[in-house]
Image: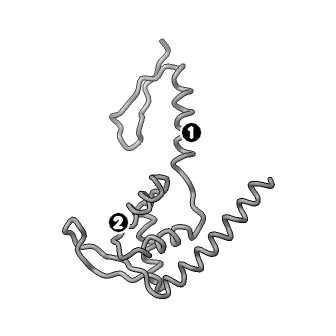
Amino acid sequence: MNARVVRLFESVPLVCLLLTPDIIGFILLASDIMKRDSKLDLLQGTLDLLILRTLQTGPLHGWAISDRIQQISQDVLQVNQGSLYPALHRLEHQGWIKAESGISELGRRARFYRLTASGKKQLELEVDDWERLTVAIGRILEEA
């Protein structure tokens, strides 16, 4: 048997697999499929739109915003904290959302974000732009 030991996860050095040549190709193929399915790059500004739309239903804290986006998208979209919190600060700086301190459902202090009047107007503009963009992309996909 011609086998080799490889690390399965870079961050967990103790997890290893014994791979034979006949299953290496399958694992590489599965890895490519997983990368393609789980790494959907969003157009710049799309996260702002998603956050504004999520807050349209009422105030939420950061983790709940991320969780709600993931839930509604049926796990297709996952917003990590490294992207979420800079976006929240940017939206707050632009005056489209307002943050207020409160207590989360777990009894912890949290910042709750709500949509402002100018945020509601911006959401309308962003939705219109998104609809135009998706129609244009749809036309290209149909014609090309």
Query: Which one is in front, 22 or 77?
Result: 77
Position of residue 130 measured from the top left corner of the image (x, y, whole percent): 62, 70
Position of residue 110 measured from the top left corner of the image (x, y, whole percent): 27, 73
**Label 1 SS:** helix
**Relative to 136, does residue 58 appear above or below in the rendering?**
below
* Amino acid carrying mark 2 in the image: Ala
Name the residue beneath numbered marker 1: 32
Position of residue 21 measured from the top left corner of the image (x, y, whole percent): 53, 20
Q: Residue at x 53, y 71 (%)?
A: 49
Q: Residue furthest top?
A: 1
Q: CA distance from mark 1 to mark 2?
A: 31 Å
* Comes first in the chain, label 1 or label 2: 1
Label 2 Cα crowd, 10 Å radius (few <14 / some 14-19 / many 20+): some
Name the residue beneath numbered marker 2: 64
**Label 2 SS:** helix
**Relative to 142, does residue 47 appear above or below in the rendering?**
below
Q: Residue at x 54, y 19 (%)?
A: 22
In this rendering, the label closer to the viewer, 1 or 2: 2
State which quadrant residue 63 falls in. Answer: bottom left
Q: Residue furthest right?
A: 143
